[in-house]
Image: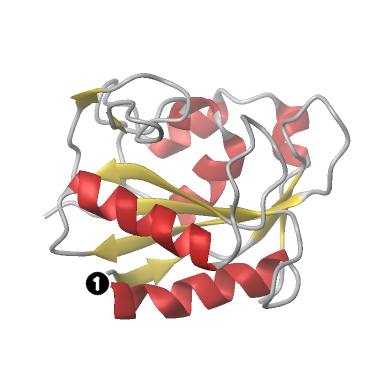
Amino acid sequence: MADILVALGANLPGTEGGPADTLRAALRLMPGMGIKVVRCAPFYETPALARYEQPDYVNSVAAVETALPPEGLLAMLHRIEGLFGRVRRGRWAPRVLDLDLIDYRGLITPGQSGMSGVSGMPLALPHPGVGERGFVLVPLRDVAPNWRHPVTGEGVDRLIARLPAAELAEIRRLER
């Protein structure tokens, strides 16, 4: 059985402390919500993608197991975000917690890009843009080094190799 992969990110302080503290707390909460964390990548500090100034992000990827179907898992991830104070303001906005369903056992769904699974939009799997985002691919490689993009079949190493060197240089592994 292929892994279910969830990307974690935060760049605002929350009730648990800084962004890394929030990610740790979200990971601890998941088992009680029916999401077993099997493996988790180290945390990385990465620049925000937004065109306006905001703090750097802390990112990671977790391989999880759950009995929830994809839509149910996404709804649970959004519920967890809400428990930490996440308010959806817009694309690329700063956030206290961001949990994205990246891959669900290789399933491919014809959802729309952008904020999939939000506001009635169909769930898109794999997550749109995963193949071009270093802040997801680098920790994904740590937790699932043999992962292949379900649509293109490309391995994570090949996807990372296509990223600009300047982008990769800005992704810094943090001590946990």
Q: Which residue is located at x 19 percent, y 64 percent?
A: 66
Instruction: Give residue 63's position: percent from left, percent from top.
Output: 34, 60
**Up-down: is 164 above or below 117?**
above
Q: In this view, does 38 lie to the left or right of 166?
A: left
Question: What amino acid is labelled 1 in the image?
Answer: Gly
Q: Which residue is located at x 35 percent, y 19 percent?
A: 112
Confirm whether residue 4 shows in the render.
no
Q: Mark 1 points at which residue?
A: 34
Instruction: Give residue 143's position: percent from left, percent from top.
Output: 41, 59
Q: In which quarter of the image is residue 73?
A: bottom left
**Up-down: is 66 above or below 130?**
below
Q: Which residue is located at x 59 percent, y 55 percent?
A: 86
- Give the color scheme: rainbow, by chain, secondary structure or one colour: secondary structure
Looking at the figure, which quarter contains the C terminus? bottom right
Instruction: Give residue 18's position: percent from left, percent from top.
Output: 75, 70
**Up-down: is 45 above or below 30?**
above
**Up-down: is 26 above or below 48?**
below
Looking at the figure, which quarter contains the N terminus? bottom left
Q: In this view, does 11 lie to the left or right of 39?
A: right
Residue extending farthest right: 53
Q: In this view, does 123 lie to the left or right of 2?
A: right
Q: Is residue 89 left or right of residue 55?
A: left
Instruction: Give residue 116's position: percent from left, percent from top.
Output: 38, 30
Q: Which residue is located at x 34 percent, y 71 percent?
A: 37
Q: Is mark 1 on a helix, strand or loop?
A: loop
